[in-house]
Image (cartoon, rainbow, N blue to C red):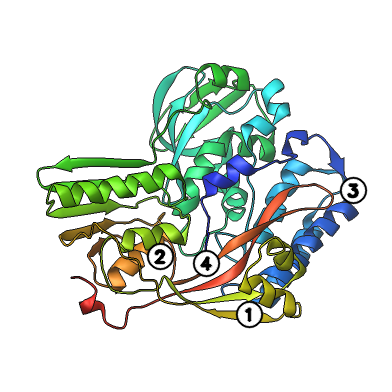
Amino acid sequence: MKRIILIHSFFVCLSQFLIAQSDIKLSKDSLHLDIDFIYSKICEIHPDPFMRFSFDAFTQLKDSINNSVNENETIGTFYFKAASLISSIKDGHTTMLMPSFPASKNLRYGNNIFPLDIKIIENKVYAVFDHFYKDSISGEIVSINNISLDSLMKPIFNANSFDKYPDINYKSIEGDFLILLNELHGSDSIYKIELKGMPKTHVTHGISFDNLMKQNRYVSTNHNPYKLSTNNNTVISQFENFIPNDKLHNFIDSLFQIVISESIDTLIIDVRGNKGGSSNIISTIISHLTLEKFKIYNQVQIKISTSVKERFEKKDTVLSSKIFEMENSSIYNMELEYIEEQKENIFNGKLIVLTDRSTYSAGSTFAHLIENMELGEVFGETGCDDIYFGEFVFLSLPYTNLNFTISTKKLYEWRSENPKKSRN
């Protein structure tokens, strides 16, 4: 279990969508073949696709989507239908990649688009900023151009995959709402926004992608995902993700050098919104908190398929050799060994971990492990169960070329047998 990456925003950065060509029409038969391709690949590759959604329900949904496909449908509208099939199995790592602005040439050089930034809270959509007027705006959106928000948001929510809660997808939807709304309903020059409790309709105008760029709406910044602050004898550290890189490893090293050298009493690790990364990062942090041996996952199951074998083709390991020896469709059960890392800086003070419903994958596993080993107090509920899926493969639909991912492993989190002995 070397690398598990979720992070929906990561998906957005990697996407190479042809939604940019949403004016292109495809035949009904071609789109049916794309839907059937999704169906067959999920059944072929995913280790347990029907843990949360039955095979019969999945088949019925596939047939229903095929029946709903129109002749000469655009790639943009088809995206939502295909994505709803993938997201139905409720595995946050098996997902249709969302469109991104840099890839969307028809928006970049063509029609004006919806000008409001939004915030989603408990499935309700709130207006935040109007880019046409360059001013803040507040209020729950009830309708846009007399179309109810419920009908607008239903296909968008259905296109996003989650396990327990939808919170993990809110940020991605917020960032791409302008492009998603355009793909669903096209563009308008004037937008009439009905806000809940407001007697007067907010009227605004579509804005071009170039104008958004001038306002720095989509210009990347030097954002630091790892932060550290001190307050009296408390250190607060924030991890927005566990994606392995030199910056993260250096941050962890410096964090524990500080808490040990300055005899810090309380360490707060904030993983709210942490959507995952690598299990290696979990083991590195845990090894600074205990001398006891531990596991991250007790068991990992891999469904053997051609795609999985291709993934391991360049890896010269015992695991890859075993996978190539097995027949397709069989399940390989990995029993994982204990991890014993000797770190110089071991923190023995009070540990607090902060989580929320958008803490997912490796972020969630870290919090569960802290709780199970009784290494500290965990506040908040994560958005991931102790059995979930990961390590996905990338695939493209044969006709629309839309990209999607499918998990290759089923992960069973480990539980400590002697949690009282975990701390020194």
Separation of marks 1 and 4 at Cα, in angstroms:
14 Å
Give the mark, 2 or 1, whose residue is nearer the N terminus.
1
Is there any visible trace of residue 48 in the rendered image?
Answer: no
Residue type, numbered disc 3: Ser
Separation of marks 2 and 3 at Cα, in angstroms:
44 Å
Residue type, numbered disc 1: Tyr
In the picture, which quadrant includes the C terminus?
Answer: bottom left
Q: Left or right: where does residue 378 sit relative to residue 332? A: left
| Image quadrant where residue 57 sits | bottom right
Provide the secondary structure element on which disc 2 rests: helix
| Along the viewing direction, whichever of 312 and 328 lies nearer the viewer | 312
x then y, percent, for residue 114: 58, 28
x then y, percent, for residue 372: 30, 73
Q: Which residue is mark 4?
A: 1
| Along the viewing direction, whichever of 26 and 274 lies nearer the viewer | 274
Nearest to the eye among marks 2 and 3: give it: 2
Give the mark, 4 or 2, whose residue is nearer the N terminus.
4
Q: Which residue is mark 1?
A: 332
Q: Which residue is mark 2?
A: 365
Q: Residue at x 53, y 21 (%)?
A: 204
Nearest to the eye among marks 4 and 2: give it: 4
